[in-house]
Amino acid sequence: MTAITGNPLLLERQVCFALALANRSVLRVYRRLLEPMGLTHPQYLVMLALWEHAPLPVKEIGNLLQLDSATLSPMLKRLEADGVIERRRSDNDERSVEIHLTTKGHDLRKQALKIPEQVVDALGGDLPLLEELHAVLTKVNTAAVASENP
């Protein structure tokens, strides 16, 4: 175990506080950029998964995004109501529902291609730093998930 020196309870030393502030700030950037597309940030994540892997079973989307069905289902209903996805029973397993992109969903991808660059610019334009941050956060998430299931 690593020994922490000084006051371990200072607010500015808390990883959770730094992550919470960064999360809110970054999501504000995404909110501003995604609003013209009619997407929320969580819906954008669903669409990213679908643009990469569609069609996908609902369960697989949940696994990829680490979301439970209670969180994912309302999002999928909204995306379907907006006409960017459609739900279909799987041909291989009638119990499984697959999510397919509609033409509108495919077309939305063209607009989304601008988002990553705009995010990098809004966050200071330092792509190597953001890539390093992504790698660190991925390690932190992996360790946190592993600590839940020792």
Image (tube, rainbow, N blue to C red):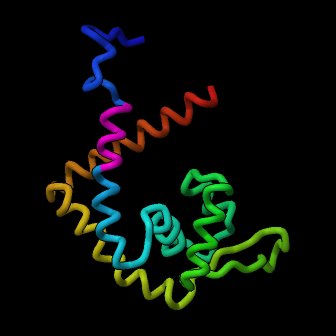
Q: Residue at x 30, y 44 (%)?
A: 22
Q: Is residue 42 above or below residue 77?
A: above
Q: Is residue 126 above or below residue 49?
A: above
Q: Which residues are magenta?
A: 16-24
Counting from the top left corner in percent of width and height, residue 39 is at: 44, 72
Q: Is residue 64 above or below residue 21?
A: below
Q: Residue at x 65, y 52 (%)?
A: 68
**4 relative position to 78: left or right:** left
Q: Residue furthest bottom?
A: 103
Counting from the top left corner in percent of width and height, residue 103 is at: 52, 91
- Is residue 17 shown in magenta? yes
Q: How many marks?
A: 0
Counting from the top left corner in percent of width and height, residue 62 is at: 62, 57
Q: Quadrant of residue 60?
A: bottom right
Counting from the top left corner in percent of width and height, residue 71 is at: 61, 56
Q: Residue at x 57, y 87 (%)?
A: 102
Q: Residue at x 41, y 80 (%)?
A: 109
